[in-house]
Amino acid sequence: MNILIADDDPMQRELLAGFLAKQGYRVLAAADGEEALTLFRRESIQLALLDHRMPGLTGDQVLERIKASNPLTRAILITAYGAVETAVNVMKLGADDFIEKPVDLTDLLARIHRVEQSLAVAADVAEVVDAVEAGPLPLAIIGDSPAMRDTLSLVRRVADSPWSVLIQGETGTGKELIARLVHLLGPTPAAPFIEVNCAAIPENLFESELFGHEKGAFTGADRQHRGCFERAAGGTLFLDEVGELPPALQSKLLRALQEKRISRIGSERDIAVEARVIAATNRDLRALSESGGFREDLFFRLNVLDIPVPPLRRRREDIPALVAHFVARDARRPIRIAPQTLDLLVRYDYPGNVRELEHILQRSLTLARGSLLQPADLPEEVRHGTTLAQGLLQERLDILERDLLTAALEETDWIQTRAAERLGVSERVLRYKMGKYALRRRSV
């Protein structure tokens, strides 16, 4: 990674440059803002470390011009000790982080590692988006929240491997979509993707569905049937709701996964099968296996790699984009969403996750009388849901936190080091909270 350092203090500049060069980074150093911008235009810079106070162009002015030229460039501002207002302002300008003087080199390195991780996630997400736009997925990937970006980054890294994958998440989070993504991004996207819903197939038919049967193997078997394992050869076998498998079938599935061989019902011949297995469940398989409800050896066989899918309440930032998508797809006439309606939709908890949001909008769009979707058009559980109480709870928690901060500061005569120690937080967290609640010592 190329790092640009802009600092008018030569000792500070040389210290940072030497330290980062020893960590393996390519470092470019500038003595002022103008020189920093010249280097930025000439070189490919992934991260800029900018001193806030420099003669001529200040650090935030340099940051503003860098972001205008390339919004993807990351930046860390170096600020004076205790400059909370400055830190808040530079974060608004687009800085990824700030660090106070004197610079703790270990702390700085940890922050740079976080920036590197963020850049890696962004690259993974961009690759996933490109693949989705070119691939035959039935539903677009919608969501740019940190939780969703982390999930997509994990999908990108998992996809290239041949190992089994276990996708775990609540009902309606989009586990099938994630499974299709893993397949699409893998080495054989054109190969078959065969899905088996383990909860929907009767137990007496499941073995035939999974492994196939020969003609005459049982009453009604009037022809040979190739099972899902055979049909998925060279591609992906997706076992949805795998936690619902009965114990007898769990052992047969385990044997097929271990030996990579199956036998059709009514046949004495084994068939070699080579298919990647992706399983999904809304149950906690680890806890289920510990309690004896699921074979522990099968759990470990399926859980070589795991992808947790976040519930919608953990990525509320994605709800407006999802709402826009479903409205554009499902509205039978032009319709707009009232701001109060969107606010209610964002605050609702969605026990059924994205699927529930989809169904809520389909119902509301169908029954709405006008061209503006009003709160009254939403189901009662959304209009009067528990999230309204949670909103009040957050407000009360904020008041309580502010009062605790104020009390600790007054008891320690506004000495921040002592107040932070009393509260059990770092001084940096305390200063951030003071800025958040605009806490200032009253002048006497």
Image (spheres, rainbow, N blue to C red):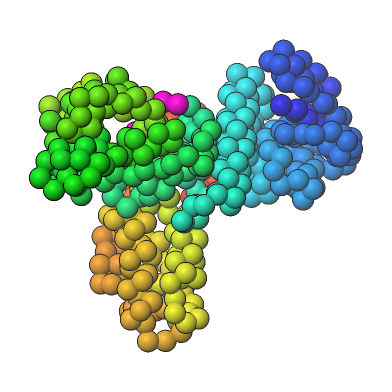
**Left or right placement of residue 204 versus residue 139 in this view:** left
**Left or right placement of residue 166 versus residue 136 in this view:** left
Q: Which residue lies furthest to the top in this view?
A: 22
Residue 188 position (above or below residue 327):
above
Q: Which residue lies furthest to the bottom in this view?
A: 369
Residue 205 position (above or below residue 342):
above
**Left or right placement of residue 350 versus residue 184 in this view:** left
How far across and how far down the image is residue 255, in percent?
24, 23
Q: Does the magenta stretch include residue 437?
A: no
Dominant secondary structure, magenta: loop
How far across and how far down the image is residue 84, in percent?
60, 41
Q: Which residue is drawn at 63% across and 24% down?
A: 108
Q: Which residue is drawn at 46% across and 61% down?
A: 322
Q: Residue at x 37, y 70 (%)?
A: 361
Residue 202 position (above or below residue 165):
below
Numbered-mark total: 0
**Where are the magenta residues, as a range?**
162-166
Closer to the camera in the image, 158 or 120: 158
Q: Residue at x 68, y 49 (%)?
A: 93
Is residue 245 in sight in this rendering?
no
**Left or right placement of residue 227 versus residue 293 in this view:** right
How far across and how far down the image is residue 186, in percent?
51, 35
Closer to the camera in the image, 103 or 380: 380
